[in-house]
Amino acid sequence: MKRSSQVSVSKIIQLMKKIPIFDAFTSEDRAQMAEHAQIYIANTDEAIIERDAKDNCFYILLSGEARVLLRQKDVSPLATIEPGDMFGEIGFALGTPRSTWVLANQLSALLRVDHKLLDALDHALKGKVKDQIILKMANTISALNSR
């Protein structure tokens, strides 16, 4: 997976406007985040997250599609990730090794969020990002409990 330096701040802001996670963000919030954003491009079948790897980031899929697998060679995915979905937040929050593989189903653009990015944001915006992580984790727990 490669970092793209060819995506302009205005294009990142435009993409963020289409993602529900950023609905609670003001135009200024999105602009501040886009200034420090790292956009990555994953090719078809390329690993975005590798099981057992330790990483300090999570991702928001901006375009494309990805699949979640327990083992890299599995045929049936555990889940499909679509634009707007956040993933990898548990490893980010807890500092634990990744529990699954995430592979791109097609050419995909991702916003990578790490501690460096969060540290560059003002306190209020950092809180909004953390609120979105908490909301995502709570929804995941709720979905698991209802099964």
Image (tube, rainbow, N blue to C red):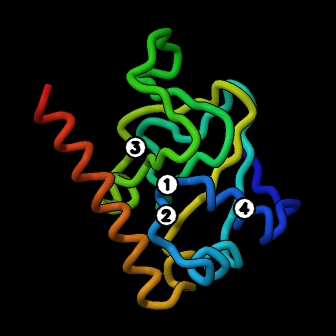
The residue at which mark 1 appears reads as 20
- Dots 4 and 1: beta carbons under 8 Å? no
- Dots 3 and 1: beta carbons under 8 Å? no
Q: Position of residue 90 (x, y in %)?
A: 33, 52
Q: Which of marks 2 and 4 is nearer the N terminus?
A: 4
In the displayed structure, 61 sits above or below 28; it is: above
Cα gap from disc 3 to disc 2, whole angstroms: 28 Å
Name the residue at the top extreme. 75
Q: 123 or 117: which is nearer to us?
A: 123
The residue at which mark 2 appears reads as 23
- What residue lies at 64% left-to-right and 48% top-to-bottom? 62
Cα gap from disc 3 to disc 4, whole angstroms: 30 Å
Say which mark, if any, is on residue 14: 4
- Which mark is in front, 3 or 4? 4
Secondary element at image label 4: helix
Q: 103 or 133: which is nearer to us?
A: 133
Give the residue type at disc 4.
Gln
* Residue 116 in sight in this render: no
Q: Earlier in the sequence, mark 3 or mark 1?
A: 1
Answer left or right for 105 relative to 49.
right
Q: Where is residue 4 in the image (x, y as percent from the top left)?
A: 81, 56
Q: Position of residue 76 (x, y in %)?
A: 45, 11
